[in-house]
Image (cartoon, rainbow, N blue to C red):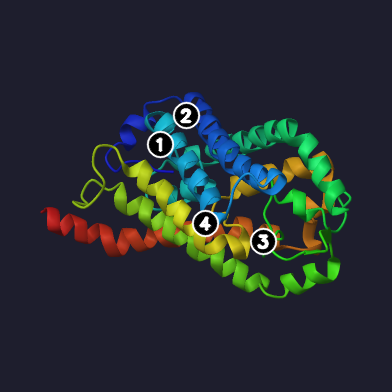
Amino acid sequence: MNVRMGEQNSVKTVSISKAMLAEIIGTFLLVFFGCGVVHAAVLTEAQIGLWQVAVVWGIGIMLAIFAVDKISGAHINPAITLSFAVWGRHSWSRVLPYFAAQLTGAILAAALLFFLFSGFIAAKEKELAVVRGKAGSELTAMCYGEYFPNPGMTTLRDGKYDLEAHNELKALVPQTSAFLAEFIGTMILAGIVFAITDKRNQGRPLANLAPVFIGLTVSVLISVLAPLTQACFNPARDFGPRLFAFYAGWESIALPGFSDTGWLTVYILAPFLGAIAGGGLAHFALLPIYAELEA
């Protein structure tokens, strides 16, 4: 998710095809590890508590950045790509190709996870008495796209899906609150990325440890915000798997169109706006101070 300040020229010397391949691989790793741990937690109860899921997400991001950073800058997130372009750290001509690559990587990871866990998905649907594509199948669709609030919290009664309990849960987090959570989360993430990858910041992580702290930032944000929105902060991470889930049988539960616009406003628009705001906050408030202290 980062482009080192001062290393933009080295990234630009890489051909667009190689940079796109790197973004496909990086985003694939992010989604495979991140959504993979969600699959394991939801379908097999392999994880105990939110922090274990959050840590795997963070480690997945670290590994993805270390793998492709020197090739593409390791944006692995359309919101970060757009923010970098807005604030002069990425070429506008590469924005749409990066978007396409990131979405491709996310879809490929979702498809592989579906192939690996399809038996567990069917067993969980049978256990909870839900039909894929119908109300209640959010409980398995949440392995791919995201929902607010987290449908795995209190949607069950006597071990089965209960529509009334689900509606009571939904009332706790209106769309405006979910939008704000995703906006703030992505703003913090982008601000941290800008701050700790600026070479003028004398307090930045050294020895190429910025990916570690970016991953930890995501882990902390997930720990705070996942109960509200499942903690996205990345339009490709949500929309790619959500699009795959639509064609894998979840249909309108995965992608409800404009009958329920939360997938668009909360998980696409909010991260884009939040990343631009976070980059702007760093650009105007922090980076000039770093430059002044360095002078």
The quadrant where residue 187 appears: bottom left
Separation (CA) of disc 4 from disc 1: 23 Å
Circle 1/circle 3 CB separation < 8 Å:
no
Nearer to us of marks 3 and 2 is 3
Mark 3, residue position? 150
Circle 4/circle 1 CB separation < 8 Å:
no
Give SS at disc 4. helix
Residue at the image position 87 percent from the left and 53 percent from the top: 130
Nearer to us of marks 2 and 4 is 4
Nearer to us of marks 4 and 1 is 4
In the picture, the disc for residue 19 is: 2
- Point out the tag, 2 or 1, that comes first from the N-terminus: 2
Q: Is residue 75 visible?
A: no
Mark 4, residue position? 222
Kind of residue at badge 2:
Ala
- Point out the tag, 2 or 4, that comes first from the N-terminus: 2
